[in-house]
Image (cartoon, grey):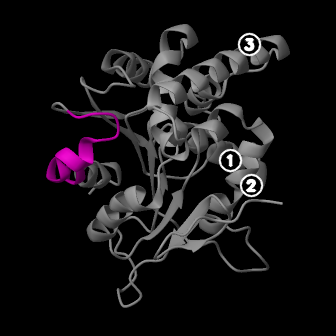
Amino acid sequence: MAPKPVPFPGFTPLSNRVYLRNGHEKAKPAPADEPTTIVIFGWGDGMPKHVSKYSDGFAELYPRARILVVLSGTFQASNQPLDDRVEAMMPVVDTIFPTPTGSDPAVPERVLLHAMSNTGGIFLAASYVAYQKRHGPDKTFPHQLLVCDSTPGSLDFASQVGRWSHAMAVGTGKYFPWPIFVTQALWYMFLWGNWAWEQMKGSEASGVWAVRICMDQSICPTDTTRLYLYSKEDEIIWWEDLETNVADVKAAGYPVELEMFEGTPHVGHMRAYPEQYWNRISSCWKAAIGK
């Protein structure tokens, strides 16, 4: 039996992971220079009360847009089978791009995607693949702007497992009665065990898979602008690793923008500098649609 959706005030659950909030009912249709749909892929174990600060920010910026939020756990990101990851994102695809019926023309969408941390990036990639599974292998998920908040980082497991286990401990520590360092130690052992199992099976780690998918021009449209939000003080994603990835993205032909924040922690840029954060997203959106 699938787990029940968690309470998320103001949102309608489309599944136990995907939630929808429609644009302001009294607002007129979104003008041509605003997104019609925004999808937020939350960070690992992000709670609704925290993720909602981002949906509220987008709603203030674009009140007519509908907003979908994907909540995922770090365990799901690291351990969920690929087919299950993709299937879990079908409600995102089917809500934005329903399969046309009869002679009804498809309504043009202007889409802004927002991925947070590596967990958000993994399920972003799963949505890209879900779109092709639903609409055909020659199709790419249409969107005008992709915002990457504190993602991606290095994919070298041995050098990063300490950071990943720390992130998982922070996200799940509230569920355990012991000190957080014990939780981190347990996650550390789990990640090593999971890595060893993947090596034995010859399977691809979810983070490696996600970065590969997001660099595949047959899956991700090359005319989509990518905005990377990051800081040198991020304790989980090193800025050098992110900039290395950005260089590869540029070389692959994707238009890229960067915004560095001063002294902010992992996925903490908006809380510290809300004006800088939302202004950068807004300006990149306008540039991406040629306004």
Query: Tags 2 and 1 in contact by the CB under 8 Å rule?
Result: yes
The N terminus lies in quadrant: bottom right
- Indicate the secondary structure of the residue bearing disc 2: helix
What residue would you read off at disc 2? 135
Magenta segment includes 276:
yes
Return the residue nearer the eye: 49 or 148.
Answer: 49
Cα distance between the residues tagged 2 and 1: 7 Å
Is residue 266 visible in this depiction of the protein? yes
- Numbered disc 3: secondary structure: helix
Task: Tell me the tag on residue 139.
Answer: 1
| 204 in relation to 256, above or below | above
Kindly report which numbered mark, 3 or 2, lies closer to the viewer in this rendering: 3
The magenta stretch spans residue 127: no
- Which residue is under mark 3? 196
Q: Quadrant of residue 217?
A: top right
Q: Which amino acid does label 3 sit on?
A: Ala
Q: What residue type is labelled 2?
A: His
- Please give the range of residues in magenta: 264-280
Label located before the other in sequence (3 or 1): 1
